[in-house]
Each structure stands twice: as C-alpha cells, then as structure tokens.
Amino acid sequence: MIEEPIHRCGDCFQCKNGQSNVCQNFSITGMHTDGAYAEFTTVDETFVHGVPESTPLREAAVAEPTSIAARAVLEQSSLTPGDRVLVEGPGPIGVLVATIADSIGANVFVSGLDRDAKYRLPLVDDRGIETVNLAVDAAEDRMTSFTDGRGFDVVFDTTGHHTGVEDAVEHVRKGGEVVVIGLPGDGSELRMTPVVRGEIRIETSYGSQWRDFEQAIRLIDNGTIEPAAMLDTSFYADDPTAAFEAFLDSETCKPVFSFD
Ligand SMILES: [Zn+2]
C-alpha cells in the first residue's frame, strides 16, 4: 500500500469538477499533518493505493513523484512523439519527466547546473538521455544544434526557481509550450511581450490526482520507470537531516529511508 499525500476534501467545487489536485480545502501529509518517518502510520483508506506484488515497496516509494511527472507530461502538456523536449532541472521530478517523455518517443534533453554535474546529470546520461551542464561554454551551442536552431517544442521547468521559467521562454520555439512544474518562487522577471509575440503557451502542473497515481504505479510495474537507478537507500529514518542535506547539495537524487 502507498499513500497519496495530497488529501482532497471531496466536497468542494474542484473536487466535484474532477480537479481534486487543486482542491480548495486540501491538506498534505508531512506539511499540514505528521508525515510518515516512522515504522507505522495510519492513513485514511480513501488515499491508499494498492501496490502490485511484483513491485518492491522501495520502488513503489517513487510513485508520488512519478505521479507528478506523469500528470505534467501525459495530462498537462501537449507533447507528442518526435517532439524536441528540454527538461530543466535533473532532480527527481526532472528525471522522471525526462524518462516518461523519452518513453513516448520524444527527443529529450536535460539541463542542469555545475552542482548537478557530479551525480544527477550522469544519472540521466546513464539512461541514454542527452544532458547539458549550463555552466559549460558550449551549452547554448549544443541546444541550438539539438533543435536545428528552432528552439524546443516543449520545455518542462522543474527547477523550482524563478529563473527556470525565464530560461524556458528563451529556449522554447515560437508556437511552442512551457510547462511549469516546480513552484518557481518569487522574483520572476518574465517578460510577457516575447511570450505573446511567439504565441507561447504557458501551462502549469500541480501535484497529481488519483488517476495519475494509479498510472504511476503501472509505469513502475511495467518497467517504464526503473526506480532502482535513481533510488538512494543509504539513508535512515532516524537521521533524516543527512538525507535532506545531501539532497539540497545535489549529492543524491531520490533518498529513500531504510527502517532496518
Ligand atoms: Zn475539495
């Protein structure tokens, strides 16, 4: 069993309207209520999903970020096979977005920063997906040649930083689409004139719904997502700080706690 952490109220307009990920009265496990850094926890059965016997529990642990990536790529974007796609940010959501986009036949490119060069970008490289370190001089040239100078059809911003959206608008082609997944934070200096002149669609994707979760579990079970490659099980629940520090320093991608 695995818990869907965004708890919808089931009663508001959005919930009844099939938009439960933007429920007006949602609560998030670990933010509004205690999380599950414990051997045992109780969960309302409404938010529990079954895990196939063929999926190890430690792999099912990435169902939640996979559901977010699945929603962004398969529900919110207009991505089609053959599209040239830039994924900004090689964190867990970025890696999962890139993997799902790759699995439906898109040509995927993942960008990261210098601090991603040691662990996260090589992780994506190992999956046969092209990567670029934006701090390297040739970065822009490589993106230009990847898109024949046109820009990307779709750019997913998973950076969680306001400059991610600004960069996305620079790298998307005219008539293309930007999908913002991370919360970009304040301070954006996004200039709307080039967005309108280029008729660039700006789409957002927030959290996930019940169906995205079910889809994520299937994508893990059928091998589209291979969590083993991105999981880092070297952390323990009795020292969560170590995992958060390593994560923030980009020294790991997806820490999963061991309880033994
Ligand atoms: Zn609701």
Image (cartoon, rainbow, N blue to C red):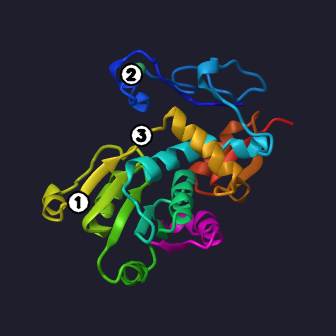
The tag on residue 200 is: 1
**Frontmost residue, 224 versus 98:** 224
Question: Which residue bears the numbered disc 2?
Answer: 16
Give the residue type that dot 1 points to: Ile
Q: Residues within 10 Å of mark 1 (few under 14, many from 20)?
A: many
- Number of the label disc, if any, that sits on residue 206: 3
- Please state the horizontal and vertical placement of residue 69, each as a whole percent of the image: 51, 49
Q: Quadrant of the N terminus?
A: top right
Image position of 167 with respect to 1: above or below: below
Percent of width and height locating residue 234: 77, 49
Where on the picture, by quarter, is residue 228? bottom right
On whether residue 96 falls in the magenta region, the answer is no
Residue flagged by tag 2: what amino acid is it?
Lys
SS assignment at label 3: loop
Magenta span of residues: 112-133
Near mark 2 (Cα within 10 A), the count class, few <14, some 14-19 or many ≥20, is few
What's the residue at 41%, 40% (across, down)? Answer: 206
- Sequence-first disc among 3 and 1: 1
Mark seen at residue 171: none
Left or right, 259 with respect to 108, comes to: right
Q: Distance from label 2 to label 1 (Cα)? A: 31 Å
Write down the quadrant of residue 239 in the picture. Answer: top right
Q: Residue 117, can we see it? A: yes
Say how many tags the image has. Answer: 3
Disc 2 + disc 1, Cβ < 8 Å: no
Q: Residue at x 43, y 28 (%)?
A: 20
Q: Is mark 2 within 8 Å of ligand 1?
A: yes
